Amino acid sequence: QQPQLRFDSKVALVTGAGNGLGRAYALMFARFGARVVVNDLGSVEHNGKKVRAADLVVEEIKRAGGQAVANYDSVEDGELLVKTAIDAFGRVDIVVNNAGILRDKAFANASPEDWDLVYRVHLRGTYKVSKAAWPHFLKQKGGSIINTNSAVGIFGNFGQTNYAAAKAGIQGLTNTLALEGAKYGIRVNAIAPNAGTAMTATVMPQEIVEMLKPDYVAPLIGYLAHESCPHTGKLFQVGSCWISEIRRQRSGGVGFPLSAPLTPEAISARWHEINNFDDGRAHFVADTRQSSAELLDNANNTGEEQNNEDDDDEGK
Ligand code: NAI
């Protein structure tokens, strides 16, 4: 039997936790013993009154016997969110950068204001909250950040240039922060979730919204946030209790000899090799240094070895 993963001495800060996925994360952390900062700048209708979304979640946690405080600032003011954690609980151990908005429009019609807003909430917000938590993580030699990417940030989607770019930026931040945090015991991962929420209700049919519960995503956040989890710098796709890791695959590549000028025509002639993922040479690339190894090797490609290989091939 696996030991239960508890968060009894820990403080978790969840952004955009008044609704949807963030709310599910906040409730889960509280259920497993964490003290929780529930951040959300939004309001919702409740019993005919407009109330702070964060307050409702805090009340729900407290009613169940947990500990939580609300914070109503925008993630763009990340330092205020972290201040709430320090003022209320004296520490911060876990940051889930989850807050988000959409401003979907085809690129031709999308305004620069929407571009800036989506960038500010997603990428700059993730940066600001992480930046404010970082000195605490460094001092206590540990901490976990979970950032929120999206399938759209990985694969793209029509009408979502602003969102796709901001989410892809979050992945770049995640990859690099994981490297910088490693020697201090700070782990940084990202997820691309799928869940029926207010955000997806605008684009998904109602029965799918109801099927894809945020509670089906939350346990992965629990595992990644827990100090027993060794993983960092990873990206996971998760939804409806289905979880997988995404990694980058590269074709075997073609090294052209440096002895002759490389031309667009020469590239075109070997294009089928450049994009061949089925010749047994395709591989997964772990990091930037590994990614440049073959490229640097090719600096010694005088063409002789290459020609020999070609001769061999022809002889077969
Ligand atoms: P949601 O709309 O239900 O919840 C987002 C919350 O963030 C809202 O309560 C909103 O008030 C809050 N928020 C917005 N701007 C904020 C700001 N500047 N500061 C603080 N809070 C702010 O959305 P959902 O679906 O729960 O999304 C959560 C995250 O997951 C987002 O980052 C979203 O992009 C991402 N995501 C969700 C998917 C899904 O299927 N639901 C798919 C892919 C990514």
Image: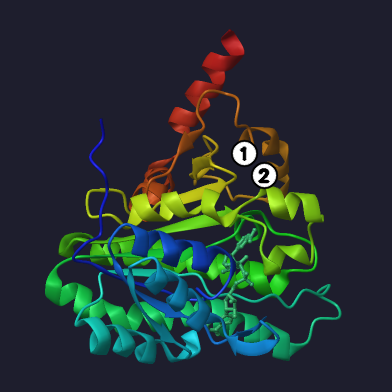
Return the residue at label 1.
Answer: 274
Please identify the residue farthest to the top as the structure is shown: 316
Figure check: 222 above or below 268 = below
Using the image as rendered, state which of residue 22 and residue 312 is in the foreground: 22
Is label 1 or label 2 in front? 1
Q: Quadrant of residue 304?
A: top left
Figure check: 120 above or below 67 = below
Quadrant (top left/top right/bottom left/bottom right) for the C terminus: top right
**Structural crowding at the residue carrying mark 2, measured as other residues with C-alpha within 10 Å and reported as few (<14), some (14–19) or many (≥20):** some
Q: Are marks 1 and 2 in contact (CB under 8 Å)?
A: yes
Q: Quadrant of ligand 1?
A: bottom right
> How many marks overall?
2
Q: In the image, what residue type sits under mark 1?
A: Ile
Q: Which residue occupies 18% across, 74% down?
A: 138
**At numbered mark 2, what does the secondary structure look like: helix, strand or loop?**
helix
In the image, residue 296 lies at what x, y percent? 38, 49
In the image, residue 158 lies at what x, y percent? 79, 62
Q: Which residue occupies 45% across, 62% down?
A: 25
In the image, residue 289 lies at what x, y percent? 34, 53
Using the image as rendered, state which of residue 91 and residue 77 is in the foreground: 91
Q: Answer whether residue 187 is visible to the viewer in this image.
A: yes
Q: Is mark 1 within 8 Å of ligand 1?
A: no
In the image, residue 288 lies at what x, y percent? 38, 55
Numbered circle sitting on residue 251: none
Return the residue at label 2.
Answer: 267
Here the colouring is rainbow
